[in-house]
Amino acid sequence: MDMKVEKKKLNLKDKYKLLTRDLGWEPSYRSKDEIYPYVKYEGLKVHDWDKWEDPFRLTMDAYWKYQAEKERKFYAIIDAHTQNNGHLNITDARYLTALKIFLQAISPGEYAAHKGFARAGREFAGVGTQVACQMQAIDELRHAQTQIHAMSNYNRYYNGFHAFADARDRIWYTSVARSFFDDSMSAGPFEFMIAIGFSFEYVLTNLLFVPFMSGAAYNGDMATVTFGFSAQSDEARHMTLGLECIKFMLEQDPDNLPIVQAWIDKWFWRGFRVLGLVSTMMDYMLPKRVMSWREAWEIYGVENGGALFRDLARYGIRPPKGWDDAEKAIDHMSHQLMLGLYQWSFGTAFHSWIPSDEDMDWLSAKYPATFDKHYRPRWNHIKKLAAAGTPYKNFGLAKLCQCCQLPIVFTEPDDPTMLCNRETTYKGEKYHFCSDGCQDVFEHEPEKYIQAWLPMPALFQDQQGDIGAWMDWVSLKDGTDNGDYAGSEDQRNFQQWRGLATSNQ
Amino acid sequence: MPVTAIREYVGVPRDPAANFHGKQLVYVSWDRHLLFAAPFLICLPPETPFRELVEGPLKALMSPDPDAAAVDWSRVEWLKSNQPWTPDFDASLAANGIGHKDQLRLRTPGPNSLSPAA
Ligand SMILES: [Fe+2]
Ligand SMILES: [Fe+2]
Ligand SMILES: [Zn+2]
């Protein structure tokens, strides 16, 4: 393109027009259906792609400049963190469990989001949409990279970080987040946008990133805090894109409403199940806790989510179908899942531990209706077993949910003493679910979910139940990466190094 | 439609019995005994006598519960696929109609030490 050098600087509006909308063209020798083969099959009707608004009006040149600046600041702080033994400033090495889960399960999700948005940027027909998706694709790639870099310093000193990519692909608890992203990436572009752009970025992000990043700040992890700041402005853009995309779908045609509502129902529930891991982090894993999972849900779920769905009501959207079941689960889910993570900790690439009396008092203050009644007796018994020299390890593994892939640890919405047992038979095969929400997702598209790779049945298919062989395969170092924090190498090393750094011994 | 797709699409199930080297999966859980975070996954040949499932893996897996030793196995109520059901201890899993990935539940009338008093 010929550009006159002496030309005056473009104003923002013209620049946006030239560098985004004007990049598109009308095809002349191929039909639009051939070029964009995936925009119709999901049943969504779009009449005018130009109605897609981009409130940020960001162009690629400005984007590069802005991101490069953030990158420079980020790596300067990460280098300083490494050089100054920043890892010794964390409250306690127990904190690292939260980071290990993040690195194994969530950072790969950033990478998956990158792939998904790169694809959506190609598959959507509107140029405004394409550019916004491309930018988000690059953001998400940067998030994955900067997270890995931010945490890599911990890998020099602590266990459980070294094989996060194998953990991502092969270990059991990561498949919860992975199947969430795989499900979205194997859907059409519109469903992908609802799954990630709307449900994940808009509805759930505050319940995921805010707890992790404030958890990092409370526990002295400067590396992760720095990543959080570096990603913050991107997330603002992502949330806007997510909200914009749902409004666009709903405004384009009234027939889109039931399709969009079904996706909101599905992706709220799938996202809520992924948050199960976050709930355990907030209630159990942070040595210095930020707030309880219940408190976070009140602020980000009930208040923010409630306001959002009141706003969307004018399009005919109602709150997600699983909302009430979610509310009933809030005071139970972290305890139920943490009891599982502890008893299966021989198979986790992170440490867990029995909550101390002080921890349990905090939990009973935060969960006055449920903790003492249901969960303290179980922890006390587990504590007794450990004191007797027979720490509880549940080699019975677990029945997994065919949809969310979590172990079926959750109870009936209205009966916390009764595990939720849901099953169905499809083409002669049995399938199990943790909840009505997960069963609904399956029943809607069984041909998709019968293909789910469930890690625990796979252990009996591929390793014939040999847990040692399975550990090798997932790159889990037995006795080092896994098990109770008490007595672990991480605990010993942290105490020793911190002692050296803070005393004259 | 069983999946939203651009054309006819048939999925391949990932966990059929044929993949388990002559064995099958059985899920077992003990109602209202929630020290065990989830139903157990037990993998064994369909020819295994039901008694062996109980005496072997099941009793071992249940033993950390303080009430396990007190279970009166003659009074256990069983459910299969959430329906009341009576096993024949001397017959095999297959002869008992326990299929691959079936879920068994047991209910015991005795004490429940770790559960809140009703
Ligand atoms: Fe991200
Ligand atoms: Fe994002
Ligand atoms: Zn589920």
Image (spheres, rainbow, N blue to C red):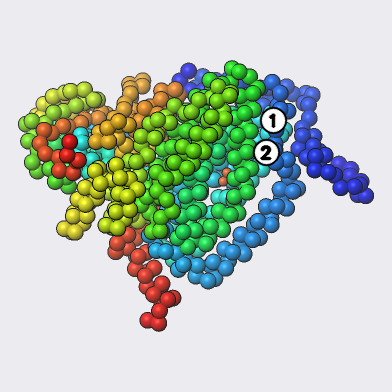
Badge 1 density bin: few <14, some 14–19, many ≥20, Cα 10 Å? some
Q: Which residue is mark 2?
A: A132
* A288 lies left or right of A200: left
Q: Is residue A189 left or right of residue A65?
A: left
Which residue is depicted at the point 55% across and 22% down? Answer: A316
Quadrant of res A494: bottom left
Viewer-closest of A415 and A444 = A415
Image quarter (top left, top right, bottom left or bottom right) of the C terminus of chain A: bottom left
Q: Secondary structure at mark 1?
A: loop
Q: Nearer the viewer, residue A206 or B105?
A: A206
Say which amino acid is labelled 1: Trp
Whereabouts is ligand 2, in terms of quadrant?
A: top right
Say yes or no: labels 1 and 2 on the same chain: yes
Label 1 close to label 2 by CB (< 8 Å): yes
Are there few (<14), some (14-19), or many (20+) residues within 10 Å of tag 2? many
Percent of width and height locating residue A97: 40, 55
Which numbered disc flags the more N-terminal residue, 1 or 2? 1
Residue A10 at x, y percent in the picture: 85, 44
Question: Dividing the picture into quarters, in which one does residue A3 lie?
Answer: top right
Task: Please report the residue visible at 67 percent of the width from the left and 52 percent of the height from the top.
Answer: A67
Q: CA distance from mark 1 to mark 2?
A: 10 Å
The residue pinned by badge 1 equals: A52
Position of B88 with respect to A247 (left or right) is left
Up-down: is B114 above or below A264?
Answer: below
